[in-house]
Amino acid sequence: MLENIAAMLEAWGIRNPLEQLEFLLDPSTLPFAIWETLYAPLAATVLAYVIGLPLGILLVTGEEGGIHPLPKALMNVLNTIINLLRSIPFLILMVLVFPLSRLILGTAIGTTATIIPLTVAAAPYVARLVEASLREMDRGVIEAAQSMGCSTWQIVTKVLLPECKPSLINGATNATITILGYGAMAGSIGGGGLGSMSLMRGHGRQQFIVLYVAVILLVVLVQIIQSIGTALCVKTDKRITHK
Amino acid sequence: MEPIIEMKNLSKTFGDGSNQVEALKHVNISVEKGEIFGIIGLSGAGKSTLVRCINLLERPDSGEVLFHGMNLMAMNEKELRAQRKKITMIFQHFNLLDQRTSLENICFPLELVGTPKKEARKRAMELLETVGLPDKADAYPVQLSGGQKQRIAIARALATNPEVLLCDEATSALDPKTTRETLRLLQDINRNLGVTVIIITHDMKVIEEICGRVAILNHGVVAEIGKVENVFSKPKTEAGRRLVYPDGLPNELLPKTKVIRVAFNGGTAYQPLIASLAIDCGVKVNILGADTRNIDGKAFGTMLLGLPEDENEAANALAYITSQKDVTVEEVPDYHA
């Protein structure tokens, strides 16, 4: 049957479809590609939040007039570093970070190795996302918390983070999807997964069936992540009455 | 009576350079234990700054804030936070935590001091009872009306058994009926729990309804202070009158200033009497009417002058004008009648 389909596709002008179909239908191909696509970006997202969440909190609480102002020089350095990292295009950043990957993981090639550049690229982005979420917080509520004798730490853990949770979840959804996109890009220089598959086979070897299947799968993955994020955000947000 | 909160010589300036605003200028107010004290003023008078200076959400540039005689401004952060559990606050926009239920909101200040959860919930239920909303324990703020939100905020403010409750325009976002109910609740809390209440408002009705004493704040200065019935029935200052009679004074309350008629009998017209009075004596008089002529460089005619309210200034002005050459002065006793 596969031969019949391949023959039909060939008749439509697609080159060596049989090889492509056999590759795609190999039970080890797609599940593994999907796994590789998800694993590095998800790991990087978690790591980026480990770094970016505290930074984002610092950006809001430490500014002049914030709940715990820090020295202006320190805030300037922090902002400059974040802006600097954010302004380097991801592909270039990845190459620049190679030595760091080698230092930490012993290699700069492979799916696991992409976790390092992905984290470096995502952490400042996450810091800005967290900052934007926390800035939505009503000053009056923070003032009320202070009037009740809240310490800075208590304001962060009991007011800022819980009250901004829906917005933070939205941000995390955005971050995950963006990093997933970066991860696909990493396919061009040694990463694995659907991104690499569509670049190497689809573009490089003109295997368009592989290309389209990979792209469609990426689209579906993004849709699923977005749906989960939105549902979680709505579920958490107590300001929404009709669910 | 024993003072519970004393504001001594408080001053606060915002901004610098040309944007500088003196929000408070040497404010002295002493609030007694157990009273309901009102602070009223038009917007921009410095009320909100003043109330925030009491619990040091805003730090005054100079002066002292005493709570039971202890200087709050001399305390470190930790000591101050402990005192803030005794001086709690409610706000115009309620400032509840949106992601918490009513019960959890009331539990919040108890969590901060590490009260066991079960105990905190029990206390919160009692407080819901106190503010008359026992059935709203599991409602989120979004499901409550403005009046209900303020009740929850009041319950939250009472959770740590405070001695003083600061109310910053607490009824300004509520309709008249809800305002009255909320004020009634504050009055009950004051009577039954002995909590001293300090109310900041721009609304005279709020003060009349429940306050015992009132201070009028005007451009950062305490213009008048005293029992509500005294201050409101006979405001002594311009700021007080503007508040109490926003549409202008009733006739019988117009200031009884002395009015004089000055006759010019041909002195030099180029000698500006009123201007030199202002410069030499620093006294400003009010020209109520004038009919003067300049004949051949000499001034003839009469002028009606209202002397300042202050008796000393009035006497100074009168003496100055009388001492001028070619001028006769007589009092007009029946001008206001």
Image: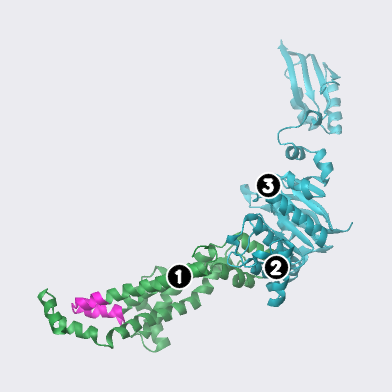
Chain colours: A green, B cyan
Task: Name the mark on residue B141.
Answer: none
* Dot 2 amino acid type: Gly
Left or right: A111, with B161 as reference point? left
Query: Could you tell me which secondary element the residue under label 1 belongs to?
Result: helix
Query: Could you tell me which secondary element the residue under label 3 belongs to?
Result: helix
CA distance separating discs 3 and 2 = 32 Å
CA distance separating discs 3 and 1 = 41 Å
Question: Percent x, y for residue A240?
Answer: 52, 63
- Which residue is label 2 attached to? A149
* Dot 3 amino acid type: Pro
Chain letter of the residue beneath label 2 in the structure image: A
**Residue in front for this viewpoint, B205 or A135:** B205
Q: Residues within 10 Å of mark 1 (few under 14, many from 20)?
A: some
* Dot 1 amino acid type: Ala
Query: Could you tell me which secondary element the residue under label 2 belongs to?
Result: loop
Q: Residues within 10 Å of mark 2 (few under 14, many from 20)?
A: many
Residues at circles 3 and 2 in contact by the CB criterion of under 8 Å: no
- Which residue is label 1 attached to? A231
Residue B138 on the magenta segment: no
**Residue in front for this viewpoint, B310 or A239:** A239
Task: Name the mark on residue B176.
Answer: 3
Question: Percent x, y for residue B84?
Answer: 74, 65
Question: Percent x, y for residue A73?
Answer: 56, 67
Q: What residue span does the magenta drawing correspond to?
A: A189-213
| Tag in front: 1 or 2 | 1
Residue A202 on the magenta segment: yes
